[in-house]
Structure formats: structure tokens, C-alpha cells
Image: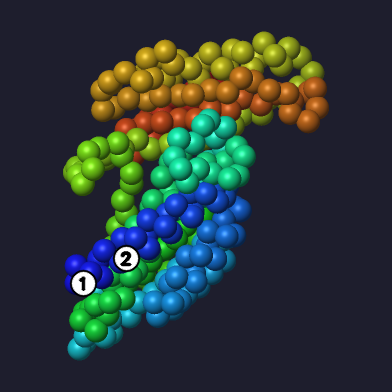
Amino acid sequence: MRLASVTAVEAQLIEFRHDLHRHPELSGQEVRTSMRVAERLRSLGYEVRTNVGGHGVVGVLRGQAPGAENGPTIGFRADMDASRDFSVDPVSYSSVVEGVRHNCGHDLHTTVGIGLAIGLAEIRSTLPGNIVLIFQPAEEAGTGAEAMLADGVFASVKPEAILAVHTFPMELGVLASHPGSLLAGRARLSVTLRGNGELDSAASDLHAALMAVSTIRPEAALEPTTPDFIYLDLAPPRKHHVETEVVVSELVMSAGIENSPQIRRKEMQAIED
């Protein structure tokens, strides 16, 4: 792309991202965001599928270089949803939706996907294969990827590799990569206790047993730690629907996917005890 084109596209993408940031949508509610993405992809000549696994959007660009139909297919994935957040949004393009904000940077992830869509469309005549752009809903809820897979996201075109990026507090203009895991993973656990006995006491005991799985205490959560850390953020036990049910829920963060089986075993042991 020529420098003039890059400058023009940069201004478009900044405005696109600011618009998404002003109008954040929670997991499963990405109606406006997915519409904006689909409209942009269609305008660039992509084959577009919408409502994949909820509000997911898939854009396919088929290269036009000789032999491209037999060339590789590469995918890029971006998430679109925002989070519950009542803190102050310290930017001029702040969220207009009370209690909802793009504090995890998914507005930027989506914008990167659109930036790729623009650049790749411009060089379509020389592309030796296909491009699949995957805009995923419900990442914060942890359900969007599975829903898109169940809905046949790769039914027509299956990529040989899928790339993605994530925001990180680094200096402007710096990109980072690392063999294996780079950022922490996250999962949720919810345990419902039922009965007519001392449920509050049982919930308190379970809460303490689960906290013992964590290698980081809450008061040290912002301090540097070892790369094999396990951090549990437990919500206070709460009554659920009726007095005979108490729910204990947690958010689990760990540095590597290889830790997942170990964490799950520890959690199940805590529940069984």
C-alpha cells in the first residue's frame, strides 16, 4: 500500500475503533459491533457469514494469484465483546453505555482485524491462497469459540493456521512474542451446594479449600510472580433462588495451558473434601 493510502486507512481505523469503544456490547449482545464488521467486510469484497455461534462474523477472501485455489488458507481471529465495568473511562471517546466498557481491548482486536481486511483486499490479485477472518463473540463469557465451532465456522473454508494478537501495556510501536505461553489463561468454576443443613458453613469451608489451590494471595496479586502461578479470585458465596442453595464461584488465572489439568485436579479435590 502506498504511504498516502496507509495514512488514510489509519484515520479510518482510529475512528472505527473509537466508535466501537463508545458503543461496547456485552457477551452475546454484539449486534451493533457484528453489523459494523460485516458491513466493512462486504464493502471490501469478502464472502461474509453472520450470526455464527451467536453474533460471530466470518469473512473469506480468496486470492487471485495463479494456483491460489490450491494455496494455503490462513486465518486471523479477533474477539468483539466488552465487559461489565463501572470505573471511569479516561478517554475522550468514552463508553456511552453505563457499566459496560472495552477494558480488555477487544475494540482494538476487532479494529486490527478490519485493518488486515483492508490491506489484504488491496493485494488480493497477488495472494497465493485464501484468508479467513474470524470475529468472535462472547469471549469474556468463555462460550463464543465453542459456539462458533458448533455452528460450523470452518464448514466451507478451514484454515491451516490461525493467528491473533492481544493488547499489552508496552511502549508504543513495540510488538512482543514468546515461545509457548505469553499471557495468562482464564477459566471459571461455579459450585452449587444444596441441602437443608448448614449451607453457609459448608460454603465457607469450600471457599477456604479453593483458596488453598491458589499460589498467590489476593493482597499480592499485583506483584511480580513465577511463570507457573495459579491465582484464584473467589466471589463471596451467595444464595441462589432459594434458601436451600448456595453458589460458590471463582475466576481462575494461570500462566500456561499445561497447568490446567493440575488446577482442575486440585479444584476437584477441594470440592470433594
Q: Is mark 2 on a helix, strand or loop?
A: helix
**Residue receiving disc 2:** 9
Query: Residue 76: in sight, yes or no?
Result: no
Residue type at the position of mark 1 = Met
Which residue is pictured at 24% across the width and 77% down the height?
123
Label 1: few (<14), some or many (≥20) within 10 Å? few
- The residue that label 1 is drawn on is 1
- Residue 205 versus residue 240: which sits nearer the camera? 240
User: Residue 221's mark?
Assistant: none
Q: Residue furthest bottom?
A: 66
Q: Give the percent coordinates (x, y) of residue 270.
A: 51, 20
Q: Can residue 234 be seen?
A: yes
Q: Is mark 1 on a helix, strand or loop?
A: loop
Residue 247 location in percent, x, y?
66, 26
* Residue 55 percent coordinates (x, y): 56, 61
Residue 177 image-quadrant placement: top left
Q: Quadrant of the C terminus?
A: top right
Above or below 69: residue 107? above
Q: Position of residue 28 (x, y in %)?
A: 59, 52
Q: Which residue is drawn at 50% across and 43% down?
A: 94
Type of amino acid under label 2? Val
Q: How far apart are marks 1 and 2 (CA)?
A: 10 Å
Report the residue at 42% width, 13% height from top. 219
Query: Which residue is more in the foreground, 191 or 186?
Result: 186
**Is 173 positioned to the left or the right of 144 in the image?**
left
- Dots 1 and 2: beta carbons under 8 Å? yes
Q: Please say if 26 is above or below 242.
A: below
Camera-side residue of 43 and 199: 43
